[in-house]
């Protein structure tokens, strides 16, 4: 059933080696003459591209196998052994991880190529690419790991790299704080992940702790433990994939360079949570309550983020909230046990979100790092390629048929409706309309109307080819990726769902035609309404609005950051400072100070004997000798 | 009987010299009384039939080493003001004496436990130059060489230490 | 007679100790140490006579050689001391005072 192939381990190894190589080159040259940027750029792209080639090879190898036997494994070495437990540094490629592999390496490579242009002239060029390669390598470890422990290695790796890259422009303190926030919030989620992993191990870990063994033993897991494990793992997923209540780090993560945002949002990091839930689908499928909770958290996150997204004025923050919102969809999908729909949305989302971010990056690049959409406008004449590709991305994001986002989002909404989750479906449709609104609000404000900042407008120009070519490739992907999973109603046969089927434990709902048409119709109507409102308001150019009432509340993101600060951060600080000021000096330090004082007193007492004169020391020696003599002559009798 | 008389005389002189060494204030007086001790010890060695050691004690100790010490004392031209003022000397001597008593008694007790043995003058070549020399160069060759090395090292050390110049008070 | 020699050796040794402990004059201290060495020599020679073996003599010679070496070094130190401090007092070395 399993087939071992040794090139599996190379896939994450290439970017990791690239990271080490570039990092060393950077460290040894940054103080002296820096190497030309081309060296770094080419070195950095080799790793991801090679990984992509190998991923294709994996795909071909899997394709050749029978659907039920599509497993490729590779055990690199035994990581550690405790008693009978052997944790291997093992890799597993099945249809699910293969799909993830393909688009992660593909989009990762494109983003690397794009970065060559975007990061040009930065003095930490080498460092940037070392981190990027490390980021991609960690994500590949996460995807390819054959068990939760190896996955956790990658899980922590992407957390680390996101921290490093978000605070990449570390001269600015707020960027460093954003990096810290991402790292700390992720720690909260990671704690959940570790606890979930521990519970899982406690439950059924005795017979091997990789996915295949766990899947085989899952029926021995008690329901209560299964629910605990599911919820704890989901806490980990909320941290990594930015769901309520841990989504707050993702908008701040915009502090990093734009390609990093693209990488975080599209290919790596945030999709990890969805992937993890799909990976543990054998677990979630057995616990309906956990799935429902996941779905509701997801769809509420989608709603909340869509509300925030409607009122942002930073182009990257709009996209950030759209990501949070789309991730909510994905969780809604995996929550209602439509794992393939969720993963398919991850897949299509990777294309159009990478496209949108890279497009936004091109705009920012053209305007010399201006991110406020109310200082842009009318750019479609200056940057036609960027404009067209971004419109394609926006249409895909908004769910316009036949762009890719439409199919994947519709699949999720249809699954929700078909499994009887009307609430989720209704909110989902509402969010679809809001998505269309805020996406095209951004497009109209940035590209249409009159230029708001004449000076910047005149200096804007189309980005270089190294940046636009990836945009075009991604635009093609965003256009056609949806057809890979064409539902039956349009004459397709859901290739992706069938491909993923062996990896996932899902039953496809057999809804009737009416339900399907209802779902599609509602989505399309919501899209149309959203885009119409956006056009009406911003299509001909609009001044920068001032917010009041609810809008102001939403503009300030419902003051969630402030709330977290008030109820979590400040109490912690208060506890910390009270420990520092009250408990530490009086309780913990007291015995230590007492001991040191005791020694000081003893020292002062014994100082008397240290007179410093040699003959007095001789006297002590004689004294000791004479006492010894006395004792010895006693014993001599 | 004659030998016993000689022993008593030499022993008394040696002890007297040692007491003088400990009590005299000026080192020159101490050195002179120490010479008395050394010479009486040489006499005692003779009584113990150690012919070579008797000669060496006179030549090396009483002769060379003591003359070196006396020479240095005179070289430094010590005035009474240079000497440390030891007002509590007697007190210290008394205290030291009391401390030393148990050690002496302990050692005496050990000596007492040894069987008594005659030390009458031995005839023949015992302790002669030839016999000791043979022993020294056969059985004790390596320690002898090591000691010669030690002497060399101390010679060099003394030259370096005393030869330092340019450091003022 | 052997006991008498050894008692004398002990007496001289103890006097040497008293000299080291009680006096502050460097020369006296130094000569007291020599006195202790001589006391040991006396014991060596006595035992050599008792056992009628001359190893004790050889050892006594060694002690003399060591005493000579010590004398050379110690006197060099005394000269240095006198040069730097102008004193012959062992109490000027008091860096170890607590």
Image: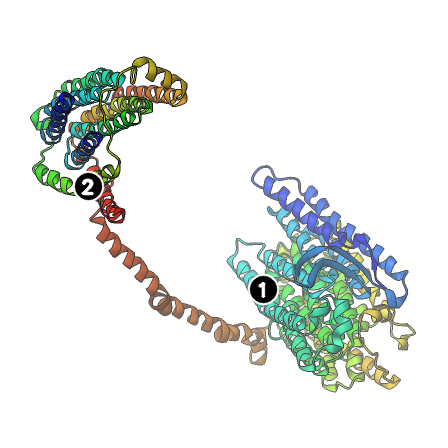
Above or below A304: residue B115: above
In the rendered image, residues at marks 1 and 2 fall on the same chain: no
Above or below A6: residue A388: below
Which chain is disc 1 placed on?
A
Which chain is disc 2 placed on?
B
Residue C95, position as x, y percentages in the image: 24, 39
To which residue does mark 1 refer? A182
Residue C92, position as x, y percentages in the image: 18, 34
Q: Is the residue marked by circle 2 packed among few (<14), some (14-19), or many (20+) residues within 10 Å? A: some
Q: Which color scheme does this rendered protein use? A: rainbow
Q: Could you tell me if residue C64 is visible in this image?
A: yes
Which element carries disc 2, helix, strand or loop? Answer: helix
In the displayed structure, does residue A94 sit left or right of residue B169?
A: right
Residue A179, position as x, y percentages in the image: 57, 60
Of residue B23 and residue A615, the one placed in the foreground of this image is B23
| Identity of the residue drawn at 84% across and 68% down | A496
To which residue does mark 2 refer? B105
Quadrant of the image containing the N terminus of chain A = bottom right
In the displayed structure, does residue B164 sit left or right of residue B91?
A: right
Alpha carbon of mark 1 to alpha carbon of mark 2: how far?
83 Å
Which element carries disc 1, helix, strand or loop? Answer: helix
In the displayed structure, does residue A298 sit left or right of residue B67?
A: right
In the displayed structure, does residue A477 sit left or right of residue B145?
A: right
Of residue A273 and residue A354, the one placed in the foreground of this image is A273
> Quarter-wise, where is residue A216 in the image?
bottom right
Above or below A291: residue A403: above
Q: Could you tell me if residue A542 is visible in this image?
A: no
Residue B125, position as x, y percentages in the image: 30, 15
> Quarter-wise, where is residue A170 in the image?
bottom right
Count of picture labels = 2
């Amino acid at each position: 059933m399993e087939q071992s192939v040794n090139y599996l381990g190379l896939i994450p190894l290439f970017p990791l080696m690239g990271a080490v190589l570039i990092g060393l080159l950077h460290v040894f040259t940054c103080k002296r003459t820096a190497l030309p940027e081309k060296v770094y750029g080419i070195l950095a792209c080799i790793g991801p591209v090679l990984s992509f080639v190998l991923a294709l090879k994996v795909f071909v190898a899997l394709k050749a196998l029978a659907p039920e036997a599509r497993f490729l494994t590779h055990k690199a070495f035994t990581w550690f052994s405790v008693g009978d437990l052997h944790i291997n540094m093992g890799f597993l490629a099945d249809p699910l991880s293969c799909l993830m592999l393909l688009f992660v390496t593909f989009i990762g490579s494109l983003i690397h190529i794009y970065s060559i242009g975007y990061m040009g002239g930065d003095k930490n060029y080498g460092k940037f690419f070392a981190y990027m390669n490390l980021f991609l390598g960690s994500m590949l470890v996460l995807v390819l790991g054959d068990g939760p422990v190896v996955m956790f290695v990658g899980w922590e790796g992407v957390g680390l790299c996101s921290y490093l890259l978000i605070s990449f422009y570390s001269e600015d303190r707020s960027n460093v704080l954003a990096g810290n926030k991402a790292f700390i919030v992720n720690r909260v989620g990671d704690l959940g992940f570790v606890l979930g992993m521990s519970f899982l191990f406690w439950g059924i870990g005795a017979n091997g702790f990789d996915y295949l063994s766990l899947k085989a033993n899952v029926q021995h897991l008690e329901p209560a433990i299964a629910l605990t494990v599911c919820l704890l793992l989901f806490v980990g997923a909320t941290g990594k994939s930015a769901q309520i209540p841990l989504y707050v780090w993702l908008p701040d993560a915009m502090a990093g360079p734009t390609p990093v945002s693209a990488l975080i949002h599209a290919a790596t990091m945030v999709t990890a949570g969805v992937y993890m839930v799909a990976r543990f689908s054998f677990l979630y499928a057995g616990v309906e309550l956990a799935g429902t909770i996941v779905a509701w958290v997801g769809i509420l996150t989608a709603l909340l983020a869509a509300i925030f997204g409607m009122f942002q004025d930073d182009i990257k923050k709009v996209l950030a909230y759209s990501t949070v919102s789309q991730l909510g969809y994905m969780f809604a999908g995996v929550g209602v046990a439509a794992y393939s729909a969720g993963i398919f949305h991850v897949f299509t989302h990777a294309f159009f979100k990478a496209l949108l971010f890279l497009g936004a990056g091109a705009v920012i690049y053209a305007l010399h790092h201006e991110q406020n959409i109310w200082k842009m406008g009318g750019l479609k004449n200056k940057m036609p390629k960027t404009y067209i590709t971004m419109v394609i991305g926006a249409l895909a994001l908004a769910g316009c048929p036949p762009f890719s986002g439409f199919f994947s989002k519709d699949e999720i909404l249809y699954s929700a409706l078909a499994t009887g989750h009307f609430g989720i479906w209704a909110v989902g449709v509402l969010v679809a309309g809001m998505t269309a609104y805020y996406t095209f609000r951004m497009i109209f404000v940035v590209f249409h109307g009159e230029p708001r900042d004449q000076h910047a407008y005149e200096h804007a120009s189309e980005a270089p080819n190294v940046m636009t070519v990836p945009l075009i490739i991604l635009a093609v992907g965003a256009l056609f990726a949806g057809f890979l999973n064409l539902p039956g109603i349009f004459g397709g046969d859901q290739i992706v769902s069938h491909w993923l089927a062996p990896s996932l434990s899902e039953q496809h709902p057999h809804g009737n035609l009416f339900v399907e048409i209802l779902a599609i119709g509602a989505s399309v109507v919501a899209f149309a309404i959203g885009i119409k409102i956006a056009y009406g308001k911003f299509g001909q150019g609009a001044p920068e609005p001032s917010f009041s009432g609810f809008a102001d509340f939403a503009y300030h993101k419902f003051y969630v950051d402030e709330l977290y600060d008030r109820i979590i951060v400040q109490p912690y600080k208060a506890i910390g400072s009270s420990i520092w000021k009250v408990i530490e000096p009086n309780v913990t330090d007291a015995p230590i100070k007492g001991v040191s004082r005791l020694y000081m007193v003893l020292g002062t007492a014994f100082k008397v004997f240290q007179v410093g004169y040699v003959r007095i020391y001789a006297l002590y020696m004689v004294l000791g000798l004479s006492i010894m003599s006395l004792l010895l002559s006693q014993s001599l009798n | 009987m004659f030998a016993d008389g000689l022993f008593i005389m030499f022993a008394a002189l040696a002890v007297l010299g040692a007491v003088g060494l400990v009590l005299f204030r000026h080192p020159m007086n101490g050195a002179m009384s120490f010479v008395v001790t050394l010479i009486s010890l040489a006499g005692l060695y003779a009584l113990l039939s150690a012919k070579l050691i008797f000669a060496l004690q006179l030549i090396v100790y009483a002769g060379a080493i003591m003359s070196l010490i006396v020479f240095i004392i005179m070289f430094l031209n010590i005035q009474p003001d240079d000497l440390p003022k030891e007002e509590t000397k007697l007190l210290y001597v008394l205290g030291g004496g009391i401390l030393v008593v148990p050690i002496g008694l302990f050692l005496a007790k050990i000596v007492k436990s040894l069987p008594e043995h005659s030390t009458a003058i031995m005839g023949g070549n015992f302790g002669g130059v030839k016999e000791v020399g043979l022993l020294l160069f056969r059985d004790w060759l390596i320690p002898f060489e090591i000691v010669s090395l030690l002497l060399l090292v101390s010679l060099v050390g003394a030259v370096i230490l005393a030869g330092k110049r340019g450091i003022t008070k | 007679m052997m006991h008498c020699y050894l008692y004398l050796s002990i007496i001289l040794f103890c006097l040497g100790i008293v000299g080291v402990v009680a006096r502050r004059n460097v020369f006296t201290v130094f000569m007291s140490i020599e006195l202790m060495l001589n006391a040991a020599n006396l014991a060596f020679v006595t035992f050599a006579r008792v056992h009628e073996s001359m190893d004790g003599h050889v050892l006594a010679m060694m002690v003399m050689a060591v005493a000579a070496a010590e004398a050379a070094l110690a006197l060099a130190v005394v000269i240095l001391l006198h040069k730097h401090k102008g004193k012959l007092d062992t109490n000027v070395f008091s860096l170890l005072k607590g």
